[in-house]
Amino acid sequence: MKIQPKNVEGFLKRPLPQVRAVLFYGPDSGLVRERAAQLCRTVVEDLSDPFRVAELKSDQIAADPARLHDEMAAIALTGGRRLVRLRDAEDALAAALGRLLKDLPAGDSLLVVEAGDLGKASKLRALAEEADSAAAIACYVEGEEELAGTVARILGEHGLAIDPDARAWLAGNLVGDRVMARNEIDKLALYMASAPKGAKVTLEDVRAVVGDSAALELEEPALAAADGDMAAVDRSLRRLFAEGTASVALLRTAQRHFQRLHIAVAHVARGQTPQQAVKSLRPPVFFKMEAQLTSQVRRWTLPLLQQALTRLLEAEADCKRTNMPDETICARAFFQLAQLARRGG
């Protein structure tokens, strides 16, 4: 069965008893890992328990297809429900999963599968979506509005509330990388542990705790492209791709940056100075970025920004519908943005 986005949180807290296998997939690998771990903890609190948790990889199942069924049929020596985790799953595992779903062993063991961005033609995804005893959960890069809700929810788990401006700033600067976002929010909660009971997280608290590396890392290629700096675009993309950053996450972050540039340039067209236009942006611009963004506002025009935004949307669509490598599509788009910036400068 396919779990709709609005039902995901409820499913992760209370998975349906008839579901014995859950597939997590999508371009946001951090969100795949986080959601998979959240579901796993509904079965076993200690995920390092060797008696109740079996960790498998794709090559192990490829070498021994029967092992998946054997692990699901095993009984924990210490008692309790058993969990089987399958990492780095690919479409080649569809046959093994299909055999398992046709002949599920008795008991209540749960299989949790983590995969990458599976397209609509994926056999693995189709199996999980169509079987009554399985579920598929897509993990796409969260937008600012969704991430703002996530920020409030995670801080709420720590007993904390957050001011709207602070929440908007966090969502705007952490969008695109769920792992980084979770780490920074947890760090913020730890910082607030010394605050008086009932205190709200403010924008000053957020800026004091969330490092500029977290705020700027994903935006580096967009900043470099908006400056027309080809060499910096190349360096930042190479590093982020090497770290496993998803192309869609980088494109979404760039869309947000160029949308904010578009808003600021529109303010200038209505009579504001570039500095005033940057200061008026909400959520507020990270203070270390103000001078760079002001310079970019002077460089770009509204027609060029419209071209840039159109190119970014096309690149994201191409990542989803073509067979060309995502990284190639993403890099080409950023170099095209840098060329537009040079035209404007």
Image: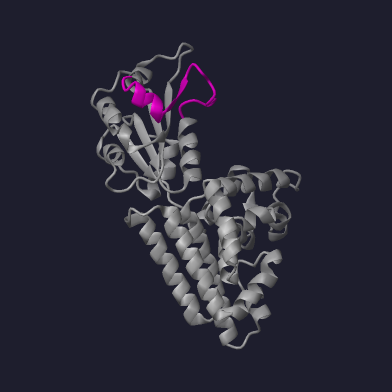
At horizontal 44% and vertical 43% (from top left) the residue drawn is 9
At horizontal 39% and vertical 46% (from top left) the residue drawn is 117
At horizontal 48% and vertical 69% (from top left) the residue drawn is 336
Locate residue 326, reporting x and y percent: 42, 54
- Residue 290 against residue 86 in the figure, above or below: below
Q: Look at the image and name its color scheme.
A: one colour
**Foreground of the two, 298 or 153:** 298
Q: Is residue 58 magenta?
A: yes
Tell how many labels: 0
Whether residue 16 is visible here, answered yes or no, is no
Q: Which quadrant would the C terminus be assigned to in this image?
A: bottom right
Position of 175 with respect to 64 (left or right) is right
**Foreground of the two, 261 or 319:** 319
Locate residue 137, reporting x and y percent: 38, 43
**Most distant residue in the left direction:** 102
Locate residue 100, reporting x and y percent: 28, 25
- Residue 60 against residue 200 in the figure, above or below: above
Q: Is residue 308 magenta?
A: no
Whether residue 180 is visible here, answered yes or no, is yes
Locate residue 58, reporting x and y percent: 39, 30
Position of 170 with respect to 330 (left or right) is right
Q: Quadrant of residue 163?
A: bottom right
**Most distant residue in the top direction:** 77
- Residue 70 against residue 282 in the figure, above or below: above
**Most distant residue in the bottom direction:** 271
* Magenta-colored span: 42-66
Q: Which quadrant would the N terminus be assigned to in this image?
A: top left
